[in-house]
Image: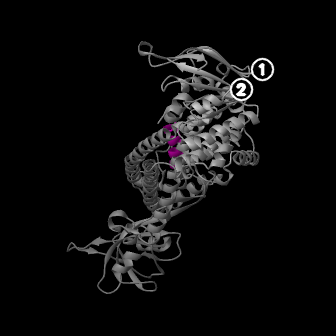
Amino acid sequence: MNKELVLSAVDIHCSYGSADASIQVLRGAEIEIKAGEVVAVTGPSGSGKSTLLHALGFLERPDRGKILICGEDGWALGGRKRAALRNRKIGFVFQFHHLLEEFTLKENVMMPSLIAGESKEDAAKKADELLDRVGIIHRASHFPSRVSGGERQRAAIARAIVMKPDIVLADEPTGNLDSGTSTEVEKLIMELAEDGNRSFLLATHSNDLASAVHRRFFLNSGILTEGD
Amino acid sequence: MKQKLIWALARRHVWSDANSTVVRIVSILSVAGVAIGVAALVILQAFMGGFTEAIASGLSTMNPPLHIYAPGGGNLNDFDLGVVQEIAEDIPGITRVEGILEKAAVVSGAAGTVSGAIVRGTNEAELIIGIDLARELDIGAGDEIRIASTAGAEISGMGRVLVDTIATLVVDSVGDFGIEEYNNSLVILPLHISRNIFRAQGELSSLGGYVERGFDPVVLSSMLDSALNEEYVGGGWPVYMSCIPYLAFHGNLFKALGLERIAMTIVLALITVVALLNLSSALTMIALEHRRDVGVMRAMGLAPSGVFSISIIRGFLLGGSGALVGLAFSWISIFVVNRYFPIRLDGTVYWIDVLPGVFPVGTALVVTLATVLVCLIVSLFPAFSALYRSPSEALRYE
């Protein structure tokens, strides 16, 4: 593979708590992901998968280490530029979809575009296309509380890719779904990765999803290792 | 578009049906609290201000705004009037100066009625009698009254007062002078008639100066007083005539009313303070309810300044809604009370019969703006909390 490096993280350390009662969550994690790669991180609950994704997405500042997304070090940027970097380059999918309950599915999908300053019309057009792509265009005007778990997660995935990010960080995207719906969402993620030559980093418990990806990492006791 | 989005987010955080019942109730209560606080302040100012204005207006209508008198209670005369008129001509804002002869007398109307009265001779061409005095004397316009003066009275050898001036006059009209005290005692008639009644040809008890609209009587009275002082004291005379604004005669009353107004404003402002504390808790609850949403927005690329703005706008929306509701409520209340449920007063005690509510536009504007400003200040705490919280921490919030 001679593809462009999308994500590079070196010697990432993260901890929680005060100095005298600190819990070390990540100990020197290192990972590289190239364009179009789908990578899974597995590990037991509480092993630090979410913390790793938050750190890689510039949502959580690590104690140490360097993270580059498409060559840009988000932590070296100011708050506004870092936010813009997240908006343009990174998509997030959360286990509990985290759609904004006060907005319809379409409005949720429009949100990143509106944050980027795009017009409402352009944002709506893009949202319609993506909702159609993920198969829930008929639910566009519904509020999250009025649709099924699978439909919410599809909307969340559409929202994550609406800005055509270079990488999508998905934290247990099927963790809250029944097996049938999980299979559908896993299939959708793999299709979207292939369609757009887009990289995905998935934190997952699902063996099916983990077995379908290009590479796998295992996180345990803060140590990230490649392989099963 | 970003600004519109931020406003839309804040608006839906505050008013959305997706909010929990507790947050919705607390939001409504906090708006109601602010509304009640604003309305209480505006209504208080409307009626306290209306009362003060009604009294001041009643006094000003019946008396020239500038009162020129001889210190020590001495009488003035037509020569003094001429001097003052000449001096006043050089002071812009004083339209004219007139002579007044005002003394106590006894008035009788229909058979068997008699009352004490203040008879005021002015440039008025008609005889006008206060409405309550007319009622007491059982007379109306066109009826005759008799005014008896003791000015030319003599004591007889038997010790009896011999009143030798009794004038019979026709009442031209019955007037409502606005103030109870005037309505039950005042008779206004032409100056020459009053001079005849009181046997005081050429004499005046005081002079009255009138002021052009837009000029401050206090300033003009001070200018006229200085000019009079210069004319007499500067010329080697003792102080002969002084000028004060008429309302200064009732200075203590207006000061007392002002003090009462301040005290009541402070008490009612405390209601607004309690309402704002309630608003603060509502904003904190809304912030907690939407903490994770803010984390999601940050993950999608919303800048920290956007998060800060959302919190401030939430405070503005809640506080502004409360202030506007309070403003509307107070305006409607004042209108309804004035129109349908006027507050009756005992005129013998309060001088006026009805307490008028005058919507205080300036005060209402200040109260509204101050409330909204404090709401913005109150929303700073949740705004800074949101600003300094990491998106990751916000996302983990359950």
Answer few, some or many: residues within 10 Å of disc 1's Cα (few below 14, many 20 plus, some between 14 and 19). few
Q: Position of residue A199 (x, y in %)?
A: 71, 28
Q: Position of residue B290 (x, y in %)?
A: 52, 40
Residue annotated with mark 2: A37
| Residue contact at pointers 2 and 1, CB within 8 angstroms | yes
Range of the magenta residues?
A: B366-379
- State whether residue A119 appears in this view: yes
Above or below A207: residue A26: above
Residue located at (45% from left, 81% from top):
B171
Q: Do the residues at pointers 2 and 1 share their chain?
A: yes
Residue annotated with mark 1: A1
- Label 1 resides on the chain identified as A
Q: Nearer the viewer, residue B52 or B140?
A: B52
Left or right position of B26 against B389: left
Above or below B282: residue B55: below
Sequence order check, earlier mark of 2 and 1: 1
Distance of label 2 from label 1 (alpha carbons): 10 Å
- Tag 2 secondary structure: loop
Above or below B9: residue B340: below
